[in-house]
Image: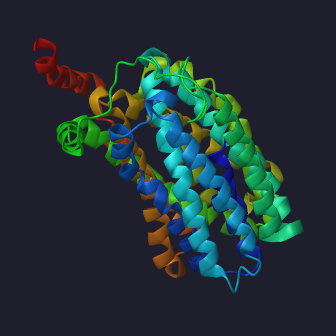
Amino acid sequence: MAQGIPIALLTIALPAWLIAQDFAAAEVAALVSITGLPWGFKLLAGPFMDRFSFAPMGFRRPWAMGAQGGLVLAMASLCLVTDPAGQYWHLVCIGFIINCFAALQDVAVDGMAIDLLPSNERGRANAFMAFGQVAGYSVFGALNGWLLVAYGIPGTALVSSIAILIVFILVALVRERPGERLLPWTHGIAAPRSIKPAASFGAILRDLMTVIFLPMSLVLTGAEFLSRMGAGITLTIFPLVAVQDLGFSSEQYAFAISTASALSAVVGILFGPLIDRYGVKYLLITGLLITILTTVMFALAEPFWREATFISGALFLSQLAAQMAFVAAIAGFMTICWTKVAATQFSIYMSLANLARSVGAGLYALIAIHLTNLEALYIVAGLNLLAVLLLLSLNLEEHKKHINRLNAPTSNS
């Protein structure tokens, strides 16, 4: 949920509010692109987490606590931005730092999930983890939309900082494993665990290069990259269409997108068991196909854009499809990770996926003046169609055979 709070501010409420303040589309797209970059560089954090740990407090928890504390301070520093027009680059830089800590916390939590969760629970667990994130950005997307209008950026940042601080206190009070220390100066011992920190960065890199370029790893990564590029364009297009074409206020847009996201997250909890039962490939393709159909239907139905029922339905379907694809993709990436370098490998997958979103937003910022909103929507649909075509060749069983062959020398020694 804590990860959802900065997402709510920087990708939902703030872009719509800035558009209402007469900021240009290119400025809003640049904000979304630059502040989203840390999510694309999470791969830099993974090797450090695999290499270094303070075992008495847990393998991942010290990293999660440090990142959470930094996130509180970074969000609080946003209170200093009182004139967004005159402090545009201050706003962008602080947003970048906020997401640096949010992304670092995300790597720690994902690594903990791979470490602690049995494989037959990952689909369900990912559905709940995704629900937590969506709950965070849905609630705070709507709340921040109102706060920005009423109190500006400082008041909004203050409320968000307090919420993140509450989550930090929760992390400080819960052990990763029984018997470990709550804080560095309290009593406790390192719990026994099967996975040890890597011996060196060289060992991590060697094992990583062995597994990251396996065929199915490249297929899933490529499909997710294409889909996320479309999502980056959508992050800019949706508030533009809502505010400029539909006459939404920034507050109304934030509330609408947050409500649709929250409803889709509740329904999305049902997808977890379906992934465990029917497999990642079919659920992921289904989510992308719904995204394509919703995007094309929305573009073709321009005369109905001012119908409240139509807009509500389109928003719900788009968010439901995104949630479905998001949960399935994460479960897929966890499935293809090699245990020896799972945290680093997974962080690379997530980094590339989030980098793709920034790439999509950044490329759109360069060509926005040459495209209509309808043309941009068709590009989003096309990117998702390419992702579906690539996923048709996905074979996770083949990947598992590769992993078993990689494990064979170790098991025979």
Q: Residue furthest top?
A: 412
Quadrant housing the C terminus = top left
The residue lying toward the viewer, choosing from 152 and 354, is 152
The relative height of residue 88 versus residue 312 in the rendered view (above or below) is below
Residue 93's x, y, as percent?
A: 57, 72
Asked whether the viewer can see residue 229, the reply is no
Give the left or right position of residue 111, taking residue 234 as reference.
left
Task: Residue at 76%, 57% (x, y): give it.
Answer: 254
Residue 91's x, y, as percent?
A: 64, 74
Q: Quadrant of residue 236?
A: bottom right
Q: Report the number of numbered marks.
A: 0
Give the left or right position of residue 405, taking residue 247 as reference.
left
The relative height of residue 105 versus residue 359 in the rendered view (above or below) is above
The relative height of residue 176 versus residue 152 in the rendered view (above or below) is above
Q: Residue furthest right?
A: 150
Quadrant housing the N terminus = top right
The residue lying toward the viewer, choosing from 208 and 171, is 171
Task: Residue at 47%, 70% (x, y): give it.
Answer: 362
Asked whether the viewer can see residue 84, the reply is yes
Q: What colour scheme governs how the chains and residues are painted in the rendered image of this protein?
A: rainbow
Q: Quadrant of residue 29?
A: bottom right
Task: Residue at 38%, 34% (x, y): give it.
Answer: 333
Q: Residue furthest bottom?
A: 86
Residue 27's x, y, as percent?
A: 59, 78
Residue 159's x, y, as percent?
A: 80, 55
